[in-house]
């Protein structure tokens, strides 16, 4: 694909404040027999990555932009597949993107839906198959709840020395691996006033753990790595379950404005391990901007010879616009730049 002459069409959504840019036309071919294989191709393809950079970089995007390429499903059991991308590359999972794709698929008629009731949108992502249940009333999408791949605890209370002193990290999986750290243990709170410090410690913890044994996926090395650090404010337990506020610092210093969908699944695994969240209870999970996801355990399973959980994360996504992006061949900035 020649990004100097082509047009790339997108539909933008936000889920609880976090952007998700859906590429609807203009992306190059991304071959592979599975979504995970297509991700590996995209990571090594200069042509595909030029389009990612065109859409995520300034002046068309920004350092916290997120989006996805639509690709074929692995088989007839899913409606479509997706490759998730951000400023640093391609992720293995994205809960807020799954919620946005569920809403988009119903809103556009990609997946036919009744005007009233629930419709399942089945999506193949690099970490496996997920299902977004889209609830409509009066012909409008009202909420989306997605069921994730199995979540599980990898390690508890891993000790790290950081620039803010010693910390203990809980490592868990929710389609990607995350390290959870109590924000108060590094002298911070999850609020906008501490935004730069939260990014700095989030990056530090992620990279300290990224090449350790805890970052290894138990069955597929293509899913290795610590995707992000979840910094947590614990707001206690109510009659329905725990209430927490978090900020997820993922990739290399990117900040999730939403409560982080796959990160919420990873947090549920830790809270269930603590005995604080059982089937029938709900995690109220706030973001740094005050938006909320609701997280639940819907089933207990075995995942890679360990105890695992199927989680359901409920939220909502809203369309923010459409665009056709292009690149003037005389533009000296090319596919753009990033400024953090």
Image (cartoon, rainbow, N blue to C red):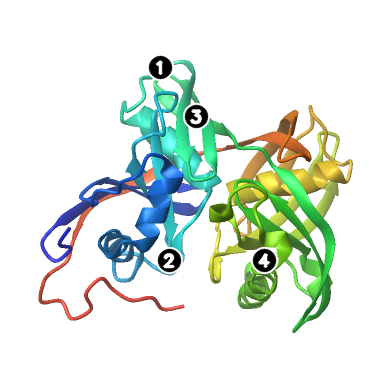
Residue bearing the label numbered 4 = 191
Task: Confirm or deny contact between disc 1 and disc 2 (CB under 8 A).
Answer: no
Cα distance in 3D space between marks 1 and 2: 37 Å
Cα distance in 3D space between marks 4 and 2: 23 Å
Task: Confirm or deny contact between disc 4 and disc 3 (CB under 8 A).
Answer: no
Name which of mark 4 and mark 2 comes first in the sequence.
2
Residue bearing the label numbered 3 = 142
**Mark 3, residues whose alpha carbon is within 10 Å: few (<14), some, or many (≥20)?**
some
Name which of mark 1 and mark 2 comes first in the sequence.
2
Q: Which of 29 and 6 is in front in this view?
A: 29
Task: Confirm or deny contact between disc 2 and disc 3 (CB under 8 A).
Answer: no
Residue 119 position in % (x across, y down): 47, 21
Residue 137 position in % (x across, y down): 47, 20
Secondary structure under tag 4 reads loop
Cα distance in 3D space between marks 4 and 1: 39 Å
Q: Quadrant of the N terminus?
A: bottom left
Name which of mark 1 and mark 3 comes first in the sequence.
1
Q: Which of label 2 and label 3 is nearer to you?
A: 2
Residue 118 position in % (x across, y down): 51, 19
Horizontally, residue 290 falls left or right of residue 165, namely left
Residue 60 position in % (x across, y down): 29, 65
């Amino acid at each position: 694909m020649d990004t100097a002459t082509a047009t790339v069409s997108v539909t933008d959504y936000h889920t609880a404040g976090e952007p998700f840019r859906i590429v609807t036309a203009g992306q190059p071919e991304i071959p592979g027999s599975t979504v995970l294989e297509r991700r590996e191709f995209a990571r090594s393809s200069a042509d595909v990555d030029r389009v990612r950079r065109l859409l995520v970089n300034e002046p068309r995007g920004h350092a916290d932009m997120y989006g996805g390429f639509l690709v074929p499903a692995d088989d007839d059991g899913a409606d479509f597949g997706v490759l998730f991308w951000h400023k640093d590359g391609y992720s293995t999972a994205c809960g807020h993107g799954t919620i946005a794709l569920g809403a988009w698929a119903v809103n556009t008629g990609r997946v036919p839906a009744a005007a009233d009731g629930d419709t399942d949108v089945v999506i193949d992502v690099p970490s496996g198959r997920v299902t977004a249940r889209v609830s409509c009333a009066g012909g409008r999408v009202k909420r989306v709840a997605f069921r994730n791949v199995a979540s599980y605890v990898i390690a508890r209370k891993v000790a790290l020395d950081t620039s803010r002193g010693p910390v203990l990290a809980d490592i868990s999986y929710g389609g990607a691996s995350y390290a959870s750290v109590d924000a108060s243990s590094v002298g911070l709170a999850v609020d906008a006033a501490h935004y730069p410090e939260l990014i700095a410690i989030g990056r530090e913890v992620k990279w300290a753990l990224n090449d350790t044994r805890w970052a290894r996926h138990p069955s597929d090395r293509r899913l290795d790595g610590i995707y992000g650090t979840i910094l947590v404010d614990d707001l206690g337990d109510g009659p329905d379950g725990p209430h927490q506020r978090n900020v997820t610092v993922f990739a290399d210093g990117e900040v999730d404005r939403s409560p982080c969908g796959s990160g919420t699944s990873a947090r549920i695994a830790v809270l269930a391990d603590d005995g604080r969240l059982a089937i029938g209870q709900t995690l109220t999970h706030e973001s740094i901007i005050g938006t909320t996801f609701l997280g639940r355990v819907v089933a207990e399973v075995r995942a890679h010879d360990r105890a695992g959980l199927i989680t359901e994360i409920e939220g909502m996504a809203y369309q923010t616009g459409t665009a056709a992006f292009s690149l003037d061949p005389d533009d000296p900035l090319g596919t753009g730049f990033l400024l953090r």
